[in-house]
Image (cartoon, rainbow, N blue to C red):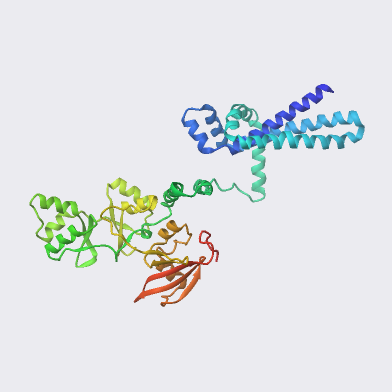
Amino acid sequence: MTITIVVIFFLLMLSAFFSGSETALTAASRPVMHHKEQDGDLRAGIVNRLRRYQERLLGAILLGNNMVNILASALATSVMIELFGENGVVYATAVMTALVLIFSEILPKTYALQHADTMALRVARPMSILVVLFAPVTQTIQVLVQATLRLFGSGEGPGLDSERELRGAIELHADDVVVGDHHAERTMLHGVLDLEDVGVWEIMVHRRKVQMIDISRPMEEILDTVLASPHTRIPIYEKDPDNIVGVLHAREVLKAIVRGAKPATAEDVRELSAEPWFIPDSTTLADQLKAFKERHEHFAIVVDEYGAFEGVVSLEDILEEIVGDISDETDVEVVGVHPQSDGSVIVRGDVTIRDLNRRFGWRLPDEEAATVAGLLLYETRRIPDVGQQFRFHGFEFEVLRRIRNQITRVRLRAVVDPAVEAQE
């Protein structure tokens, strides 16, 4: 009987090992294990391989855990029956439930949660051996499980959404610290992840704001425009702004003047200009950033599906989506957002929704419209009059100014927590 009791406690220890190993290997930090493996830690490599084949790992753990628990319960029942007769079954059930629950489940799993990375490295080698030993049984069980799932019409579940997991990790970190540099870091990380989802039409400089040069204008006027412009690249067109024939770089003009070859005719300007690079407005920022890198270009002309000129986008525009506004001594300060003492915000109609969201931490949708005016038009399905007020997405929109059919100034006031996207 003494030997049996010793065996029971040994089996409980094995059960604790399996329970703790399961928690440690599933809770261990993926980035930490990946970093350790890159630094040459063999145990971290084993952890990553075990997690790569998670079904085999869980199968081996559950198989081993159930085997030792059932065997321990059976031995305990035999001991209790020998001591107390038929009532021993009740005593064995009560005692083993308490022992398994406390010492084989709660205690090892709690410890594993508190020391997940350390414990995962410690149990990696023995668990890898057990996975290999139990492989024939676990693979057979897995075949039966998959067949049963297919029988009930349940196929394999969706794979891991790495991007969503990463976004969640960023938000979890932000819950701990969201001020100062940490807020900037969070914004930058979200900016990188958003590159695949944002089109160039959402960040481009609209054609109404693009400084352009008519090549048919007098040469002195063209040169004065180039030298006085805060921009280094200026699109040039002939007769019609949609007929863009080149992009004039201020540096090329200055180099020509220094060489004594000051442009005197439209053809001279054409020769100094670079070929315009046209891109569709549906291009994502990720694709455009890659294209800028491959072509060694910094500037592109955005056109719609009909080939009409819509605006321009530069490398700096995309970088600003990641790191925020990049200002230099040539930038023109544009006042478009005015927070008020009553908590409202007065914005120009052409201020982008993304800029507002980034500045104030709001979650106004930008899928259907890029600007505040565009969102207002999309939601109301008409051109509002001055003084009209609307409520959607947790905000009150009041039209303050309208020039012809263009909404130029809007007051926004949060009617619910602006950090929570309203459900309509």
In the rendered image, the residue lying farthest to the top is: 3
The relative height of residue 83 versus residue 372 in the rendered view (above or below) is above
Where, quadrant-wise, is the C terminus in this rendering? Answer: bottom right
169 lies left or right of 298? right
Query: Which image quadrant is residue 215 in?
Result: bottom left
Counting labels gives 0
Identify which residue is drawn at 82% across, 30% down.
Answer: 76
Task: Measuring from the top left, give residue 385's x and y in whole percent.
Answer: 41, 78
Q: Quadrant of residue 1?
A: top right
| Residue 139 showing in the rendered view | no
Residue at screen point 22% across, 67% down: 240
Vertical placement of residue 314 versus 26, above or below: below
Q: Residue at x 85, y 29 (%)?
A: 78
- Given residues 71 and 258, the one toward you in this image is 258
| Residue 423 visible, this orientation | yes
Spot the residue most to the left.
Answer: 260
Q: Is residue 191 left or right of residue 153?
A: left
157 or 18: nearer the eye? 18
Q: Residue furthest right?
A: 85
Q: Is residue 279 above or below residue 105?
A: below
Q: Position of residue 210 (x, y in %)?
A: 27, 62
Image location (x, y in percent) of residue 195: 41, 51
Q: Quadrant of residue 387?
A: bottom left
